Amino acid sequence: MSAVLKPRGRDRSPHSPVERQRKERQDGGVRSLHESWPTRSARSPQSSSTSPAAHPATVRMLPKRSLPLWLRGLILAQQGSAVVMLALVASVLGVYGWTVYVQQSWGRAYHQLETLQRQQQQMTATLEMLKNQTAQSVDQHGSEYQLPHPDQLIFMAPSDPRPAHEPAEDLTPPPTTRPPLGY
């Protein structure tokens, strides 16, 4: 005894799926592919044993609908804002890189300024120390030092000019770098 199940809410049609689709085309009714395809329980016993290739299904093309104007405008605005966002991100990264570069170059220049100021202080201190030693030696030796008279001056002929030479490169190692003070 073989029991055939009836699908709920539908009448079982004796027609094959191809005939059912043909009838739908004639009636002008639009059904989804899921509704037009018979379920396993609605198929006849011999159709369940055959392959699906024996009953080819026709695929219908959906009609192309144009999008409403407001939706096309929104899509265009989304694409435009994506381009603007990418440009802004690129410019922000560029500005950030520029600020980091400026900060590093400012830190190097500030370090060089500090070094030059330190050297100036050392030179000023050395010059003042030499002046002080000279003044003390004049005081100690008394009148041994006299102002020169013009008739005691010796004049010499100028020597031949020497070729200019390039100053030697400073081979001292660079000072240890400190983090920049700005930013």
Image (cartoon, grey):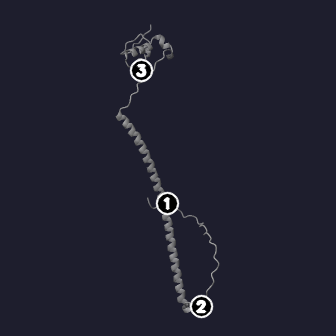
**Which structural element holds mark 2?**
helix
134 vs 169: above or below: below
Judging by the rendered image, the residue that carries numbered circle 3 is: 34
**CA–CA distance between discs 3 and 1?**
70 Å
Residue 75, located in which quarter of the rendered image?
A: top left
Q: Quadrant of the C terminus?
A: bottom left
Q: Does label 1 or label 2 sit earlier along the sequence?
A: 1
Residue 70 point in image, percent of width and height: 34, 35
Callout 3 amino acid: His
Camera-nearest label, 3 or 2? 2
Tag 1 and tag 2, C-beta contact below 8 Å: no
Callout 2 amino acid: Gln
Judging by the rendered image, the residue that carries numbered circle 2 is: 152
Q: Does label 3 or label 2 sit earlier along the sequence?
A: 3
**CA–CA distance between discs 3 and 2?**
126 Å
Judging by the rendered image, the residue that carries numbered circle 1 is: 105
Which is nearer the eye, 112 or 58? 58
91 vs 147: above or below: above
152 vs 19: above or below: below
* Residue ID at (48%, 13%): 48
Residue 23 point in image, percent of width and height: 40, 13
Q: Which mark is residue 74?
A: none
**Which structural element holds mark 1?**
helix
Callout 1 amino acid: Ser
Q: Does label 3 or label 1 sit earlier along the sequence?
A: 3
Camera-nearest label, 1 or 2? 2
User: In the displayed structure, does residue 24 sit left or right of residue 52?
Assistant: left
* Residue ID at (49%, 67%): 113
Residue 67, located in which quarter of the rendered image?
A: top left
Q: Quadrant of the N terminus?
A: top left
Question: Quick one: label 3, few (<14), some, or many (20+) residues within 10 Å?
Answer: few
